[in-house]
Image: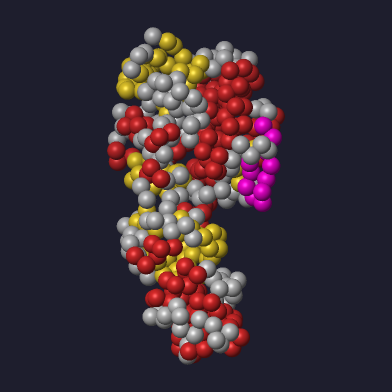
Amino acid sequence: MSDFDVLIIGAGSAGLMCASRLCFYKKKYAKDMRIGVVDSNSKIGRKLAITGNGRCNLTNLELDSSLFASDDLSKVESIISSFNVEDTLDYFSSELGLLTISKNELVYPITNKSSSVIDCFRNYLADNQVDIIFDSKVIGCDYIDDTYLIKTGSATYKTKNLVIATGGASYKMTGSDGSGYKLMNKFVSRDKFSQIMPSLVQLVSNDTDIKVLSGTRINCEVQLFENNDNVAVEQGELLFTDSGVSGICIMQLSRYLNKGRYYVLVDMFPELSTESLTKYLFDLREMFADRSVSDALSGIILKPITEVILNRLNIKLTDRISALNESSINKLAGQLKSFRIMIAGTEDLDKAQVTSGGLNLGTLSTELEVNGYNGLYACGEILNVDGPCGGYNLQWAWSSADSVARGVINRLYGV
């Protein structure tokens, strides 16, 4: 049986940051501390490696903590402010040796490769003698005499301070398989968890006429409606898929889905008012009177989309645009400004970037220690905190990990 002062379950974003911050504080206070990290994978940072399409969007220069979803937003704001964006970037640069670049408000490693982030963590933890135990799935945990006994398939580990950083339930292939929830259920009842749901994920539609648009991309504004109430609006690139719609703007909207009846209205010309677009369609009718409707519109909208819209309006592709009366032109403009797609739900957790829900912050102290269990902490995606695209969820991983590290150091050494 191996003993650790601190044992972290999970070598993902939160677990790696927690281990590295513990090393940082250990050096600062000149204390001896044995730190271990247990992970079911054969390498660290499996999910971190694929974030930002492999580029790793580290954080957001304009991060607004009010945009997170949680049962305790004030605690989220407090934790983020205690280790904020500036603190994070300074730490990556001055301590881990990682330089960053920004694209508008988004921040990436200067190499544009997530592997650089992982390498910096790996080398830093090696420099500070952190034990990383690979290929070790945790199958049990006992709490006896203020000590945690962690059992894997091949060994048992003992620690006074246990950190659960297993991630959520999205991208199971990376090890984020929801096992952390079962582990936490050993100590916290199920009613202390918010419902686990996919977030930042593609939306599914049963509209058969848009299936032919799979692979087509458009820049647009998308409004989400629940039972005819406008829930949210986003702008960006929309991608039609085999099962519905995707793209960053769609993934942002997926955070608002629950159990209602949903649809989206796609504005394919957000830069133009309905009146301006309608006038231009009348101009096209005059300019290209002998062309088919499809050819006359070829300079403003992709032909596959034109075909779907015209079918919805019962207009033939081969009809001359000059044959469209005022009512038809107005309806055409209406479709281009408010193209309706019924939403049946979201893709499942395996395709979600983030897990919504998890262990409620109300069950934890400000240092993310579980109420009633000395030395039991949780950080990262296992907690009921999720944010929009653009570095929010990684910033939560960094900030919550630091909060836990500070809590452990305070518990161990009173500093």
Residue 22, placed above or below residue 158:
below
Residue closest to the far top: 1
Residue drawn 53% across the image and 63% down it: 218
The answer, for residue 282, to whether it is visible in the render is: no
Residue 413, placed above or below residue 355:
above
Residue drawn 35% across the image and 32% down it: 179
Out of 413 and 66, give the one closest to the viewer: 66
| Relative image position of residue 134 (x, y in whole percent) | 45, 20
> Which image quarter holds the N terminus?
top left
The answer, for residue 292, to whether it is visible in the render is: yes
| Relative image position of residue 23 (x, y in whole percent) | 59, 21
Residue drawn 65% across the image and 27% down it: 96
| Relative image position of residue 201 (x, y in whole percent) | 43, 50
Q: Which range is magenta?
A: 98-108
Q: Is residue 376 magenta?
A: no
State how the image is colored: secondary structure
Indicate left or right for 187 with 375 as reference.
Answer: left
Residue drawn 42% across the image and 10% down it: 2
| Relative image position of residue 330 (x, y in whole percent) | 48, 84
Out of 48 and 305, give the one closest to the viewer: 305
> Which image quarter holds the C terminus?
top right
Q: What secondary structure characterizes most of the magenta part?
A: strand
Q: Is residue 100 magenta?
A: yes
Residue 362, placed above or below residue 214:
above
Residue 61, placed above or below residue 321:
above
Indicate left or right for 42 with 349 as reference.
Answer: right
Out of 198 and 17, give the one closest to the viewer: 198
Residue 141 image-quadrant placement = top left
User: How many marks do you count on the picture?
Assistant: 0
